[in-house]
Amino acid sequence: MAHRSVIPFGPQHPVLPEPLHLDLVIEDDRVLEAIPQIGFVHRGLEKLTEKRDMHQFGYIAERICGICAVGHSYGYASACERMLGIEVPGRVQYIRTILHELSRIHSHLLWLGLLADAFGFEALFYRSWTLREQILKIFESTCGGRVILSINEIGGLKHDIEDSELAGIVQTLDAMRPDYEALVHTFLDDVSCGERLHGVGVISKKDALDLSMVGPFGRASGVDYDVRMFSDGAYADLAAFEPVVATDGDCYARCQVRCAEVTQAMDIIKELVGKIPHDGIGGRTKLTPADGARGEVVIEQPRGEAYYYVRGNGTKNLDRFRVRTPTSQNLAGLTHALQGVLLANVPMIILTIDPCISCTER
Amino acid sequence: MQKAIYTTVGLDELLSHVQALKGAGARFVQMHAERCVDDGSYRLVYTFINVRAAQEHIAQDGSYAIENLVVEGIDRYQEIPSISSYYPAVFPFENEAHDLFGLAITDMQIDFKGFFYQVSTAEPMSVITPEVKAAREKAMKVRAAAEAKARKAAAEKAAAAAAAAGEGAAGAGDAAGAAVARPAAAAGSDAQHDEAAAKAALKAAEMEAKLAAMDPEKAAKVRAALAAKVVRDKQKKEA
């Protein structure tokens, strides 16, 4: 007779860079049920709007996560601008989008490295992070920081990025392409990689839709939803945009989607740099939100759709700030993906969802 | 271009609205709670996006909508039905609303029973701090003073227009003009007095609001210094 037991997985585990706990109910070595628990490092950032005014809070919003930092400051600034009824210049939208897409490349390369590390392919891990380093160098040379850029403010940008620097970014990305293609070839075509990824942690399209899954996790199951297809801001000027979708719904499909999204992001950056307008970079607004004024925005973070909401109360502080990050939306999908899998595959499945607990524990 | 639609619904209608959205193929985006500083009640906001409808609207006029259901005026112990039977992805947010706001959400599919977050203060987001209250009162006072100032300016403008019209008619007789002159001067003096009083009230409201936002110890020192200044000014006047 099969023996049923509960294994506590995390919050400290070699595969988890951040604290996430799972109670895995197993029968022999097969997982029957997984119950996630977070809250070990909850920082109460949404409550902090009481202490910091809406401009100061931009710096805190950027620190919600160390990987999607640019996206968080972009989303927060956009939501505040919507609340205040400000329309930022086109150049601001373009530069924000270019930095956001660079951040997607660095996030996906980081994830690819972690994936290679998880299945013990150390050379692939080094190669992925070496390429990622070039993106961090772009950030450092254009904004002065490798992770926290502090370029966005409510109403515009703190400083411009010169056209020559933007051309340099395109040159760097073009130079990266051959190495990146070789890397993708290994991830997608190497037998040892494929064996660890094919058919593992499958989620059907119907389940992905029912569980409201977002980002590459959802798109790997055939959900053709990417916020960028709504053509907000600079995305409206792209010649074409189609979400990258795969249909198998397994760990391999999640890897496939992220690999293709890096190339897609490179193309978007190249196109936007070619079209960037010269209409100024705006600047910090002096407006105060009206009592009850609301602003909300959804953006496509590297891990999926993120939602930002701000509500004013007539003072310089916000009445409410809300950020719903992709990982918190994907927790239901995570528990579903773990049902019925072998215990040995649990770390791989958790990793392919790319959980960001810092984002979730805002 | 993104638009937001907010529909206020009653707590008893919430599930039927959510069911209708689910039936129409809307995606669940998020749910969050808010505490209303003025009356202490709670507000819930449920957000959805209908991707297909959004794409059709974008093709037509380039805009799409984020749909929000808002439930207002919720009491702390009022039972709120969970929408997790329609959208299972809501479970982290419902547990969060319970743990951080103390809201009683019933029939959650995954219920952590208050242990989703490890918090050192119970229901931290339901606490309205004195600083928040003071800032809110300050904003209201400043707004009221600005409105009073605007009203007064409008009244003065109307009075000046009336006086200009009256001057033309006053040419009819000096005696009548002399009779009118005294009350008009008195009215002018009253207007100046009102203006000074409004300015003083505005200044006092701003100072009071600044003090409320300060560290209490520092605020006490500033208050004492201000009181001493008033006494000094009074003594100077008397001398």
Image (tube, rainbow, N blue to C red):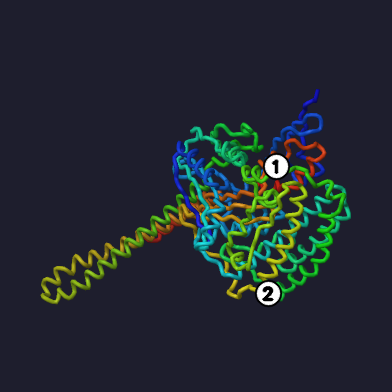
Find residue A334 and name its label.
1
Instruction: List x then y, in percent, for residue A40.
Output: 70, 40
Total labels: the figure holds 2
As drawn, which residue projects farthest toward the top? A1
Among the 4 quarters of the image, the one containing residue A10: top right
Q: Secondary structure at mark 2?
A: loop
Kind of residue indicated by mark 2: Glu
Instruction: List x then y, in percent, for residue B34.
Output: 52, 44
Find residue A162 and name its label.
2
Kind of residue indicated by mark 1: Leu
Q: Secondary structure at mark 1?
A: helix
A53 w.r.t. B97: above or below: below
As drawn, which residue projects farthest toward the front? A247
A184 w.r.t. A358: above or below: below
For residue A285, say whether it is visible.
yes
Please identify, in this view, whether the residue under mark 2 or under mark 1 is nearer the observer. 1
Please report the residue visible at 18 percent of the width from the left and 67 percent of the height from the top: B182
Q: Is residue B132 left or right of residue A71?
A: left
Which quarter shows the C terminus of chain B?
A: bottom left
B201 w.r.t. B117: above or below: below
Please report the residue visible at 80 percent of the width from the left and 47 percent of the height from the top: A197
Instruction: List x then y, in percent, for residue A228.
Output: 62, 59
Q: CA distance from mark 2 to mark 1?
A: 42 Å
Disc 1 crowd, CA 10 A, few/some/many (<14, 14-19, 20+): many
Q: A45 and B49: which one is in front? A: B49
> Given the image, what chain letter belongs to the residue carrying mark 2?
A
A342 w.r.t. A132: above or below: above
